[in-house]
């Protein structure tokens, strides 16, 4: 368990963060820039001293203002991957990787980390000769080789373009799945969070606005100002259940239905989280026919949000009575009126396969997939 | 090629220059670190004191050294009684005077290079388990090396050229305190010695230029290596 309850007055805002996170999986700290994400993670690392409060990692108190405890960063045994990499320019890649490596520790071996991150060909090079994506992989390797008990990542992909991000994301998933290393991941990109996070903590103006599962928080209407209204939508947990080689499709099962998506090159049984934006969901009051959309799920309206302009958001349940599955849909007020949509009304939710792209999917820790 | 007198003055100047820099360097680095990295009460005053030799007349510095480190001086008497060591009227005194005069130049160059270090790299090193001293030795010091080197060579050139404080503090003793500039001064006081005086002036010029060019080249090479270009 990682427990944080700290206060820190800064020039632009006051941080007052209280949160608890498990010792496993990826905990995402999400929020706008200036919300205090980096401040929290720096306090955790010991690079910034809170005014008051307490921080404990796995039962060990590393900071406690009341008891005068403040462990220096080098004794907290945390790995930190910074936004800008921060590789040492006067060391080779190998020198950077070995900087924090301790002999005789039970962490991952040098060769294992080099293989995991695919950086063997880079070992003799200098940081100045690396691309942005290569730098970040080396930075991750360097943090891992210090045998941390928790890995902190501060927007490690922010300085990279989309293809480079795609290059790094699988490695972060492998950290979680293969090394079983807990990760605190700071980001303001919902894409990354859906793909990676097990626990989501939303920070706003120095305070924890909400914490919970990605599915729960992204479907909460009151958080949309923070999670992004334009990108608003829901996250559905599914399991990869079938491949349709003839048409190049894959089937993702969730309680109450199967979602057909363009083929995913993953083994059957892989737990996959799918993000469906509210504006990509179409509603019908009877089962549609003669339509190109193949994904139609029966459900009912649960909640109607307060309208904003001509548009209105509806929360649907397309799951089973035992396992509800929430889905948000965005329609015009006119459609709402003409279809007489109100809580309790049975509807069919239609999702265009084409609307889901690779940014829509995330894998989550397999242990949680048992329930599906 | 060089006369025995010129060789003696040159050797003495090099000895004084090297010894003064070797001893002043760690102290200057510590002062530069304090000024670049720490905030403390009286920092402006401290900064002023460090820079005093740069603005005071060298003769005044020499006089102060005489009062403090002369054989009857406050510190000098103690050193002589306790260790039998004295700065008075020997080359060690010349080295002390040179070191004091070169000190502010060295501190300035080192302070600038310490301030230019990306402190985020030091934070990264600490997050990797390195304590303060290891971070200093493996990150801060190598990254500041070009500035430290520049400071040392500037200080060396200044030491070799030191005149006012030296002659006031330790006088003009052949083989002990008669460095290049002091020897040059002596020659200018003897009518008809223009020729030898020119030769010494040329020697001083060559030495100073060589030091500056060497510093420039070394700093550039170090800088390239630190940025990972070599």
Image (cartoon, rainbow, N blue to C red):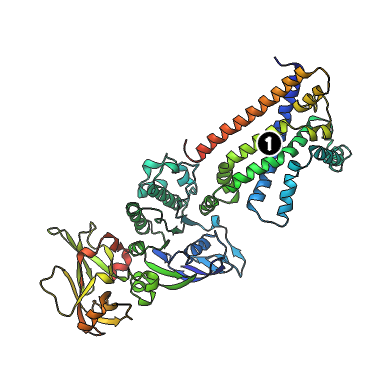
* A297, above or below A131, in the image: below
Q: Residue at coordinates 24% horizontally, 69% vertically from top-left?
A: A280
In the displayed structure image, the side of residue A52 where residue A188 appears, left or right: left
Task: Answer with the quarter of the image where residue A30 lies.
Answer: bottom left
Q: Chain of mark 1?
A: B
Q: How many marks?
A: 1
* B148, above or below A18, in the image: above
In the displayed structure image, the side of residue B51 where residue A212 appears, left or right: left
Who is closer to the viewer here, B104 or B33?
Answer: B104
Who is closer to the viewer here, A169 or A334?
Answer: A334
- Residue B174: x, y in percent? 82, 23
Secondary structure of residue under mark 1: helix
* A265, above or below A336, in the image: above
For label 1, the crowd category at 10 Å Cα-Cα, with few meaning under 14, some 14 to 19 and many 20 or more, is many
Residue reaching furthest right? B72
- Residue A371: x, y in percent? 28, 71
* A334, above or below A87, in the image: below
Who is closer to the viewer here, B169 or B135?
Answer: B169
Q: Residue at coordinates 72% horizontally, 57% vertically from top-left?
A: B41
Q: Is residue B139 visible?
A: yes
- Tag 1 residue: B155
């Amino acid at each position: 368990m990682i427990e944080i309850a700290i206060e820190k007055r800064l020039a632009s805002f006051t941080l007052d963060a209280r949160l608890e996170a498990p010792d496993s999986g990826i905990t995402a700290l999400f929020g706008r820039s200036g919300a205090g994400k980096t401040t929290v993670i720096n306090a955790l690392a010991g690079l910034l001293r809170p005014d008051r409060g307490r921080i404990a990692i796995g039962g060990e108190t590393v900071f406690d203002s009341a008891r005068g405890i403040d462990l220096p960063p080098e004794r907290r045994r945390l790995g930190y991957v910074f936004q800008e990499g921060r590789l040492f320019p006067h060391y080779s890649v190998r020198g950077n990787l070995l900087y924090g490596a301790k002999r005789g520790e039970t962490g991952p071996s040098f060769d294992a980390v080099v293989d995991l991150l695919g950086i063997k060909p880079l070992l003799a090079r200098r940081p100045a000769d690396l691309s942005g994506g290569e730098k970040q992989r080396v930075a991750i390797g360097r943090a891992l080789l210090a045998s941390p008990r928790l890995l902190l990542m501060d927007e490690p992909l922010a300085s990279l373009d989309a293809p480079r991000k795609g290059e790094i994301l699988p490695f972060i998933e492998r950290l979680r799945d293969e090394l079983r290393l807990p990760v605190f991941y700071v980001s303001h990109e919902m894409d990354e969070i859906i793909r990676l996070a097990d626990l989501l903590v939303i920070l706003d103006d120095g305070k924890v606005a909400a914490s919970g599962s990605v599915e729960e928080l992204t479907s909460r209407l009151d958080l949309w100002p923070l999670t992004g209204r334009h990108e608003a939508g829901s996250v559905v947990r599914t399991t990869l259940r079938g491949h349709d080689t003839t048409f190049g499709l894959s089937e993702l099962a969730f309680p109450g239905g199967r979602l057909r998506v363009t083929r995913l090159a993953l083994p059957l049984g892989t737990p996959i989280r799918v993000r469906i934006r509210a504006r990509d969901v179409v509603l019908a009051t009877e089962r549609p026919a003669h339509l190109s959309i193949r994904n139609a799920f029966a459900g009912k309206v649960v909640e109607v949000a307060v309208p904003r302009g001509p548009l209105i958001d509806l929360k649907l349940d397309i799951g089973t009575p035992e396992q509800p599955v929430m889905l948000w849909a965005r329609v015009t007020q006119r459609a709402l009126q003409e279809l007489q949509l109100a809580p309790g009304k049975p509807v069919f939710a239609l999702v265009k396969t084409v609307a889901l792209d690779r940014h829509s999917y995330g894998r989550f820790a397999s242990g949680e997939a048992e329930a599906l | 090629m060089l006369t025995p007198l010129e060789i003696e003055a040159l050797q003495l100047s090099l000895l004084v220059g090297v010894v003064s820099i070797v001893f002043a360097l760690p102290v200057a680095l510590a002062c530069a670190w304090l000024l670049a990295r720490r905030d403390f009460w009286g920092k402006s005053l401290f900064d002023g004191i460090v820079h005093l030799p740069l603005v005071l007349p060298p003769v005044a510095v020499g006089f102060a050294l005489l009062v403090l480190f002369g054989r009857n001086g406050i510190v000098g008497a103690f050193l002589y009684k306790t260790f039998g060591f004295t700065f008075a009227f020997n080359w060690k005194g010349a080295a002390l005077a040179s070191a004091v005069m070169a000190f502010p130049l060295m501190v300035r160059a080192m302070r600038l290079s310490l301030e230019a270090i990306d402190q985020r790299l030091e934070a990264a090193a600490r997050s990797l388990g390195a304590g303060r001293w290891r971070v200093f030795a493996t990150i801060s010091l190598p990254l500041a090396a070009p500035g430290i080197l520049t400071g040392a060579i500037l200080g060396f050139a200044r030491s070799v050229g030191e005149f006012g404080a030296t002659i006031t503090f330790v006088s003009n003793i052949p083989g002990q305190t008669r460095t290049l500039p002091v020897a040059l001064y002596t020659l200018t006081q003897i009518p008809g010695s223009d020729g030898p005086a020119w030769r010494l002036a040329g020697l001083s010029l060559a030495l100073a230029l060589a030091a500056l060019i060497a510093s420039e080249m070394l700093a550039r090479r170090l800088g390239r290596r630190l940025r990972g270009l070599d």
